[in-house]
Amino acid sequence: MIKQNKASKIIDVTLTYACLIAVAFVFFFPCLWIVLASFSKSGSIYSFRGFFPTSYSVGTFKKLFTDTTMYNYPRWFVNTLFVAVGSCLLGTFLTILTAYTMSRFDFKARKPMMKSTMILSMFPSFMGMTAIYILMTQFGMINQIWGLILIYAAGAPMGYLTQKGFFDTIPKAIDEAAKIDGANAAQIFWKINLPLSKPIIVYTALTSFTWPWSDFILPKLLLKEKDLYTVAVGLMSLDETEFARFAAGSVFIAVPIVILYFCLVKNMVNGIAEGAVKG
Amino acid sequence: MTNRFKTLIKNFIESSWRVKLSAVLMGGAQISYGCIGKGLLFFLTEVAAVAYFVNRGISDIEGFFTLGTTKADAWTGTLGDNSVVMLLMGIFAWIVLGIFVAIYVTNLKDALAVEADVKSGKKPKSFLTELKELLDKKFYITVLVLPVIGVCIFNVLPIIFMILISFTNYGGSIVPPELVDWVGIDNFKKILTLSKFAPTFIRILGWNVLWAILSTTLNYFAGLGLALLLNKDCVKGKAFWRAFPVLAYAIPGFITLLAFKFMFSYGGPINEIIRMNGGTAIGFLDLDAKWSARIIGLIVNCWISVPSIMLLATGHLSNRDMSLYEAARIDGATPLQQFKKLTLPFMLFATTPVLLGQFIGNFNNFGIFYFLRGGLYLDGYFLASDTDLLINWLYNLSIDNNYYCIGAAISLIIFAITSVISLVVYVNSPSFKEEDTFQ
């Protein structure tokens, strides 16, 4: 009986590891493929043998930053960075404030506001886009990068629920104590709750940074000049023969995000789980 | 609500002439009782509102109903009405009117409150105290002003605008300088009956529902399975194994999608290998590649969404009550039974909102087929292809081809479908029905 158990355990462990290796392969292989392709010497996908380029060099990366007449990658990169940082700062600020008030204050409009954000989020995100496109053309705000920041940041507070879930877990007793000591609501928020909510600020900042960093619909709608493109739109406009350039450009903007995620994966798990239960 | 309104009216009728002055000249009562700062603010609001409505507000509201009467004529040099701008400014005027009414009611309430204070012998609050309240008791007002304005301009206004557009004939050849008109529910009738739209709509809707169900189920169970796998006791180096899905999670979606498009393209590595082994290249994403393109879409979507579900499920799995499993093992339950009777119900309970979000997200998954097979128009479909979801069709119609009103009507239909599904699922979900099962 015990022997049989041991045998089945070995089979179980082997199977588990086989699955794990398969999963790792499935997730890792496309990434590896792109990274290697970005170092390909010839640049075209047609010169690959099977999955991998025949010869390697760093030429594509050099070309990406120097050959800017057709595809101005450095410019796109600066644009993307500007939009992402701008909407991250503004969006995080607005979202945290909204979530905090929704969690801590009880006022007449609170329930109706929560319900209406829920209804608003049921509309296809796209629907607003068409209207925003029409509005922006009417007001001549096409081809304005700050217009993008405005739209991203203004939409950010709509996703306040995760953050509200977090603030709900900070005990209110601390607030009461501070109030007795004579602090007003603004001070309680600024001096007591804000320092306690570092993880959720990190989470919010990360999500509101990555969204503009990798969004393509809005910039594609609103930015019509090639020099104003963000990286996402720019990479989409690449020709199929420019595969290595696409790969290099992708690797270059994916790497910072990947590093950020790996540093903050703990925050992500907790952030997602906490917001989800209370959703 | 009506009760509160009634008491407001009653108090107003019983009040002194000062409050009644406030009803005509806002802030009158406040000023006459000595609250000059606040009274002046109310008064200035009234002046500004009157100036706005006299100057353009009233004609804007009129324009909202007519949507323009004179057409531009280059011959006679008449500048025509721009219906779209008129609709927009009309909505704006309604919003201003709403805000003004709200301020007006606040003004009356405030006047009554000041009078009550004075009558009971108290000194009415000074302007400075009220400003200080904005940092304390009424801090929420100060804080929410900016987000609310932002959401109103960039979320609410566009949505209202599109809802209204779906009841007009805006789009196609009818764009300014042509005049747009209200057409009632014609657009919805067209989508459901006109031979141009109806067959496409039905086909896309069918595939869309199938896609949402298939991809959500697939992603959910794959993600849950992966989380359980990584959670097994015998797995050493969990962080290492978890790194691979997290890597996939971190890469921006459009890069993944474009990369997969390259991978399955004619010159891509998969066809290369097929050719090297003596086969002929397969157009996985070609015009006639209905099911292979759909299946590739499902798999690619799985690759993208499974890691996030895995992370989420990992978070929840650590909240399980392990003593239940101990008891089950002693009673001789097999791992499969444990999964079916313990893990699954718990996970479904904990993740219903997420599952619902996933379903809605997949139902409206724009990126997948836009990148893999964007811009194809097939026979038998009106400006769409057999992998397109409603949201892709919406994009093709309204952004690429100016069918604004039809697009808006489709948005409303999508909204109706998703909200009904959400409501039904939510009401029937274990987390709603048996709130305390697992608590």
Image (tube, rainbow, N blue to C red):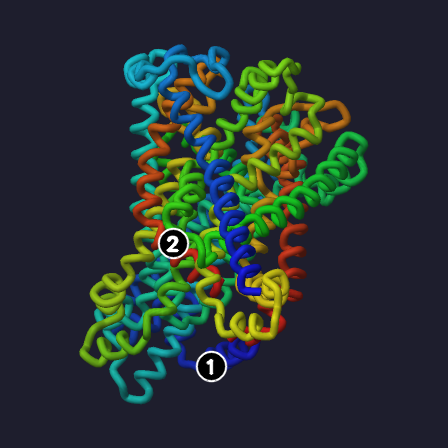
**Residue type, mark 1 in image:** Asn
According to the image, label 2 marks what residue? B147
Query: How far is disc 1 from disc 2 in space, using C-alphas?
Result: 34 Å
Looking at the image, residue A264 sits to the left or right of residue B194; the answer is left
Nearest the eye: A8 or A28: A8
Under circle 2, the secondary element is helix
**Residue type, mark 2 in image:** Pro
Which chain is disc 2 placed on? B
Percent across and percent down for residue A195 are 23, 62
Percent across and percent down for residue B88 are 52, 41
For marks 1 and 2 on the same chain, the one whose residue lies earlier in the sequence: 1
Q: Is residue B108 visible?
A: yes
Nearest the eye: B398 or B285: B285
Decide: is A74 above or below B111.
Answer: above
- Mark whose residue sits in front, 1 or 2: 2
According to the image, label 1 marks what residue? B11
Percent across and percent down for residue B188 are 73, 42
